Image (cartoon, helix red, strand yellow):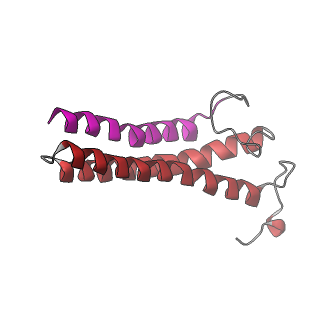
Amino acid sequence: MWFWVFMAANSIVIPILMAGFGKLFQKRPPAQINSIYGYRTKMSRLNMDTWNYAHRYFGKLWMRTGCLMIPGTMLCMALLYGRDADAVGTGCAVLMTVQVILLILPVIATERELHRIFDLNGKRRQQTDLPLF
């Protein structure tokens, strides 16, 4: 039982952090471009416009993904309740692997969106220049 509680507490950390940081990035992105905190990619750090856009877009994706992962994680942990330690450990390893994949997917989506909205110099594209992908 104690192992299940420990693993349940650990498995809910990723979705809660995603939802929390997602809301924070969406509402209050870091005020300055920096290399320590925030959504830091080459494209997002070109200028303040790309920096703010990336944080708001990424924040929205992370908040939604995190909020959807919370009940999913709780359901998975409920299904593992009462199982032996090996089953709980294996189930949590699979669950956390899926969580890490879902943690990374918004980065790919945000980069695609940044390249769709901005050119390689960080200048917003005109409406007629926007690619259709």
93 sits left or right of 58 in the view: left
Residue 37: quadrant of the picture: top right
Residue at 25 percent of width and 33 percent of height: 6
Q: Return the x and y of residue 16 as percentages of the image width and height.
A: 39, 39
Q: Nearer the viewer, residue 89 or 132?
A: 89
The overriding secondary structure of the stretch rendered in magenta is: helix
Q: Quadrant of the N terminus?
A: top left
Q: Is residue 21 magenta-colored?
A: yes
**Which quadrant: the C terminus?**
bottom right
**Residue 18: image x %, image y %?**
46, 41
Q: Which residues are magenta?
A: 1-30
26, above or below 131, in the image = above
Residue 77 sits above or below residue 32 on the image: below
- Up-down relation of residue 75 to residue 27 (above or below): below
In screen coordinates, is 96 left or right of 108? left
Quarter-of-image position of residue 32: top right
Residue at the image position 55 percent from the left and 54 percent from the top:
105
Q: Is residue 70 magenta?
A: no
Q: Horizontal and vertical percent for residue 59?
A: 55, 44
Q: Residue at x 12, y 46 (%)?
A: 82
| Viewer-nearest residue: 11 or 36 | 11
- Counting from the top left corner in percent of width and height, residue 3 is at 21, 35
Q: Residue furthest front?
A: 86
For residue 123, side relative to residue 108 (left or right): right
